[in-house]
Image (cartoon, rainbow, N blue to C red):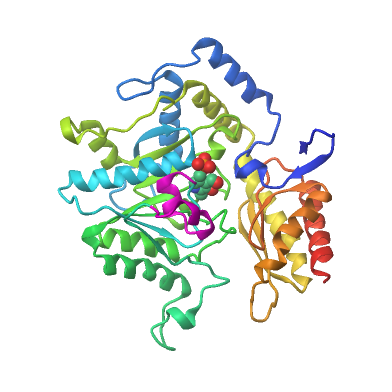
Amino acid sequence: MLIDHDGREYLDALAGLWNVILGHGRQELADAAQQQMSTLAYASGYTGSTTVPAIELGERLQQICYPAGEGRSPGWKGMGGFYFATSGAEAVDAAVKTARWWWKLQGKPDKTTVIGRRYGYHGTGFVAMSATGLPAYWPMFEPRMAGVEIAESPYPYRFDRAVHARGPDDPRTDGEMAADLVEAMIEHLGADRVACVVAEPVQGAGGVIVPPNDYWPRLRAICDRHHVLLVADEIITGFGRTGPWFALERWGVEPDLVCFAKGITSGYLPLAGVGFRHELAEAIRSAEGRETWMHAATYSGHPVACAVANTTLDLIEREGLRDRAAAAGEHLRRQLGSLTSLSHVGEVRGLGLMAAVELVADRSTREEFPAAERIGPRVHAATQARGMFSRLRGDVYNLAPCYPVETEQLDRMVDILGESIREVTGA
Ligand SMILES: Cc1ncc(COP(=O)(O)O)c(C=O)c1O
């Protein structure tokens, strides 16, 4: 719950910005910060230095972030190291720089291009904005970074087979076709020019776009085939939002680099980071001279943020919150299903404890409302008037509450959204 300065209460249906995964007001997290601050508030985490909470956090992440072992891809040795930053955009920046660095180290200095995807959101820093596939973020800051391309999204509700198929008898599924569009872009650009693909396992801010199950394994195989690094942006999906610790687990895929942020401290302090697969981490550790991985910041591995992160991980484990998120998500999606009886609800979708309701002008054609009608913002205003707060992408209303959310609170969210849609669309 959020309470505004007039004392009005709101259901925080997006857990802040998808990040306050444990909910507001957890004393344990305040205590962890207080204790660390009164022990060692700051010490350099710049190259060559670190602190105990950052070491502990790195060791713990290695245990939960696609750990090596049974059921993994052949040759997978796990994540070999982590770099801690303060925002998601910074993490994406570090991952893209690392991809370029890696290819230079391999004697392939021309492999520099970055591929993002339509509807992807990676933040507003220059690299992150450039890889973001939501054009509204671009116009007043263009030109975007040179060497960033945007591929198609695996968006089941809006993927147009007729446009992308190689004829009416194309046997490929939509998921395979969407992955193949990334491959076509790599081939068009020339694999010897492409450094990495940056992609969210489930596109979050773009409207909780859950790809078909065959998409990610195919994308991984494409990246392997063309020697392109796969950067998973798990900034929303990490730390149990979809059930497993990291969402790509669900599809049996391991990325070369993983970006995380948000839930790692439950939003109580800014912390983000990048995980490097074993081979990359080893290379970072051993590079010297001109080849050194020259990347760090004043607040890299901030000890207070890392202490709060360690306590966040403790609480997720101790309170079984990943299972709780999965169960709450199932309940939420089931309840949201009732909204499909409304004539302007085009689709209800989601995975784990993230869901979206897409509103359309015409359900049979999936036609969007004219932007000038501002249906989404009006629905948002109506939900706010009823005591709920979240965010949208156009006319897609996103929900991602905290993991300990109560069943009655989920039901109330669905009621408020339904009443608001009815009020605005008159149907
Ligand atoms: C998937 C994803 N990547 C990156 C970011 C950027 O994170 P930050 O706002 O901390 O820079 C966000 C923020 O919402 C995000 O959802």
| Figure quadrant of the N terminus | top right
Residue found at the far bottom of this picture:
168
Residue found at the far front of this picture:
140
Residue at 60%, 16% in the rendered image: 34
> Can you say whether 379 is above or below 265 in the image?
below
Q: Nearer the viewer, residue 176 or 207?
A: 207
Residue at 19%, 50% in the rendered image: 109
Residue at 77%, 48% in the rendered image: 388
> Can you say whether 348 is above or below 252 in the image?
below
Q: Is residue 333 left or right of residue 219?
A: right
Can residue 289 be seen in the rendering of this structure?
yes
Q: Is residue 65 left or right of residue 326?
A: left
Residue at 64%, 46% in the rendered image: 325
Residue 110 point in image, percent of width and height: 20, 54
| Figure quadrant of the C terminus | bottom right
**Which segment is the magenta one?**
124-144
